[in-house]
Amino acid sequence: MQKRALVVLILALVSSAVAADLAVTVYNSNLGVISETRQLDFKKGVNTLAFRDVPALIDAASVRFDLLNSGRNVSILEQNYAYDLVNPDQMYRKYIDQEIELIDKDGKLYSGTLLAYSQGAVTLQDKAGKVLIVLLANISQVTFPALPDGLITRPTLFWRYQSDADGKLDSRVSYQTGGMNWTAEYVGVLDKTETKLDLSGWASIDNESGKRYENATLRLVAGDISRVQRPTEFEYAPKADMLMRAGAAPGFQEKAFFEYHLYTLPRTATLADKEMKQISLFEPSRATVQKEFVFAPEENSSKVKVAIKFKNSQQAGLGMPLPEGRVRMFKADDDGSLILLGEDQIDHTPKDEELDIKVGYAFDISAEERLANQRQISSRVEERDYEVEIRNHKSEPVTVKVDKKLWGFWEVVKAGFEYRKKDAYTLQFNVPVAANDTAIARYTVRFTSQ
């Protein structure tokens, strides 16, 4: 309960700092927080007001209402969220046992009491008592006497309120909605030496909430907030795969906010419904990077992974918080055209942390691990001899880092190279290989059972 109260407080703080009539804060967890100012007309006493033009996926329980500098007293007594929208199916269902008129494609008029609407046909009973079945495919026009009670043209909040006077008042309304998400998209371009990386970042914002937000102050929150999941909650699924190139104007202004990072666009933006928008996240930066070859036999028994490794620091050319997102790596060919090298997903990465981006697998480097021998020293002790063979078919020497996973209680008792115990489950060492050559690293591991 305390955790949920903390999240609500964070959302209220972010959405209450409004500098315009409409502010939209988007999270990377299928959540948007909307804060808008409207002039609402209240009548003295207890009355009902329709607050229209809200998103279809609004969380009605999250609505907060405040008057702005009015000196008046308005209390919301009751709220109802109506989302039964007008459509042909609903119109037919609402008019069961009531009179309607149909005109077919030949211009013939049918009138009577609607008995049924199903299986591609409309069933009527005319004034003489005859039952008529008209196929939907043959109907060109339907006339309903009026809009049925309960049907509305757009989602609406109906407030029952009590006011101490009549008049129009400036009111601020804040609420949460589903169907909004954003992800970071990064484009990295390696130089010819493969030691420098030009990195640009884009915010890809998706609006599936059922509402258009016109000229809104736009904020993005990067971080993992705690939320209570509900079984009926809308599931976000990204639909677009867009490539944004470097060189755009600077976009969002970043700052730390609580234990997250907040990105504010210094200009207003419009988020149309069912639209994905890309905005530059930061100015393109150049970082110093290192290409690394990694053989992890438990992940792939024959291929060597290629990774681009760098530190997210000012000394390396970056030093900014990098929100979770996809990184696409490119390198320019001789004619300047970009060739995709691969892509990877990064987690939220603070400044001064290392990034290890998997690009793909090396074509001209092959690897093989062999269990050369196995000895039972005692009932609790066993030794295994391993061989790692690296075959380099490139015209220049390479160094391959080996990440070997080991379980239980183990120690290296023999090795012809330097190694380190990265953690309780990982042995790590480097294997240098000359151009067009093969190198074999041999070592012995002793396992002790409890």
Image (cartoon, rainbow, N blue to C red):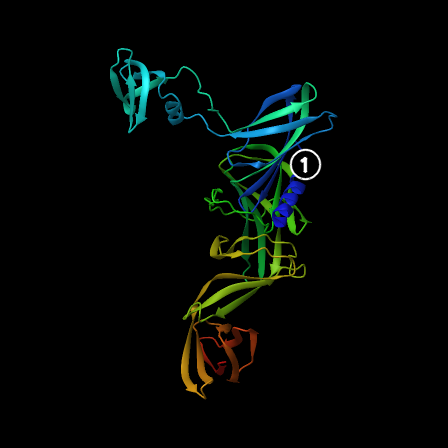
Query: Left of 134 or right of it: where is 7?
Result: right
Circle 1: residue type: Val
Instruction: Tell me the residue that label 1 is attached to.
Output: 18
Residue placed farthest to the bottom in the image? 377
- Label 1: few (<14), some or many (≥20) within 10 Å? some
Q: Does 351 sit above or below residue 231?
A: below
Residue at horizontal 45%, vertical 84%? 382
Q: Give whichever of 415, 156 is nearer the camera.
A: 156
Q: Secondary structure at mark 1?
A: loop
Does 242 sit above or below residue 373?
Answer: above
Relative to 440, 290 lies left or right: right
Quarter occupied by residue 22 = top right
Where residue 377 sits in the image (x, y, percent)?
Answer: 45, 88
- Please say whether residue 415 is visible from this viewpoint: no
Q: Report the number of numbered marks.
A: 1
- Judge from the rendering whether residue 131 lies leftward or rightward of residue 274; answer left or right: left
Which of the pair 17/100 is nearer the observer?
A: 100
Image coordinates of residue 422 in percent, x first then y, are 56, 73
* Residue located at (41% from left, 26% from top): 87
Q: Residue furthest top?
A: 128
Asked if residue 129 shows in the view, the reply is yes
Can you give x and y, in whole percent of width and height, for residue 292 in the image? Answer: 53, 67
Looking at the image, which is closer to me, 160 or 26?
160
